[in-house]
Amino acid sequence: MLAPFLLLFTACTLVPIGYAVRLSLFTERHSGLGFGGTETVFTGLGNYTRALEDEAYREGFLTIARYCLLYIPLMAGFALVLALLLDSALTRAKRFFQLALFIPHAVPGIIAALIWMYLYTPGISPVLDALETLGTQPDPLGNPLPAVVNMALWQWTGYNMVIFYAALQAIPREVLEAAVVDGAGPLRTALSIKIPLIKPSLAMVGLFTVIGSLQLFTEPMILHGTAPGVVSTWTPNMYAYTAAFERGDYGLAAASSVLLALAAALLSFAVTRATRSRSDRRKEAAA
């Protein structure tokens, strides 16, 4: 029963990872002033050293850090508030609003990025034209980070809202009824009962969002060339793409990709370990 999965996992995950690691250990060198052909040379960790010493590559991680600091609190906050509103007993047409909020996630990322680029571009954006008639001249692409965060919020808030809403639906109704009997209002119930009981879902969303943020590529790549601040090495993924397909340096591209994967793995381990440690401490305190 596991054979099909293991076969696909090996062919589509393990083999590409192994090939990327192997590729990262070699580089191509030209001889004869570029007229003597190329030679594949084993460099060991040379490509990794080049990537880590490149300021553009390190700056890409700083961009991701700034992106996470702005995007994760906003996305998690909006998704949680929407889930709590849908879970409220006063909400009507829950199915409709749940579907309506989830629809942006169903739009392919490239199409969504192209739509937002159209809305961000002065002269063709109806939104910017309407704002100009009101006497304002916004420049969304002047500072590309909030623009990229807004694109990600539009696409991923509804998806994570569904996760939070499912976790809220799993809370035993008798617990909520007991809170109402004790005199807790809707806000008190949300803050003191609902949110603490769905903390595992909050941790899972946070972990997946951090991993996804490290792989940020589609939105800034679409804005590259339109937004002056989005250079070809704006994120680590864009750095690897540029090294491979614009400079033809596949060894450097593979090394930077492997380093990015290691960073994601270490960050995942740290978040998971911290979450389990807090859960264990709470269990010990309750015992």
Image: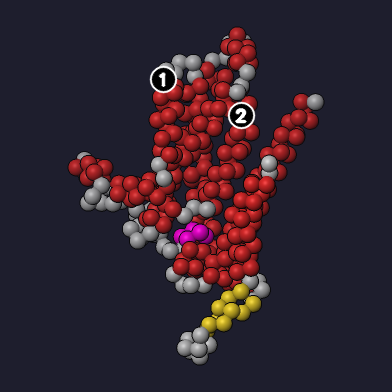
Q: Which mark is residue 198?
A: 2
Q: Is residue 266 above or below residue 152?
A: below
Q: Residues within 10 Å of mark 2 (few under 14, many from 20)?
A: some
Quadrant of the rendered image containing residue 193: top right
Element type where label 2 sits in the image: loop
- Above or below, 201 relative to 261: above
Q: Quadrant of residue 189?
A: top right
The residue sitting at 22% across, 41% down in the picture is 130
Q: Would residue 277 be counted in the magenta stretch?
A: no
Whole-angstrom CA distance, mark 1 to mark 2, is 23 Å
Image-based side of 264 in relation to 79, left or right: right
Query: Which segment is the magenta one?
Result: 234-238
Left or right side of 26 for 237: left
Q: Which numbered circle lies on residue 93?
A: 1
Label 1 SS: loop
What amino acid type should be assigned to the residue bearing mark 1? Ala
Q: Residue at x 37, y 55 (%)?
A: 223
Q: Position of residue 287 (x, y in %)?
A: 80, 26
Question: In the image, is residue 99 above or below residue 257?
Answer: above
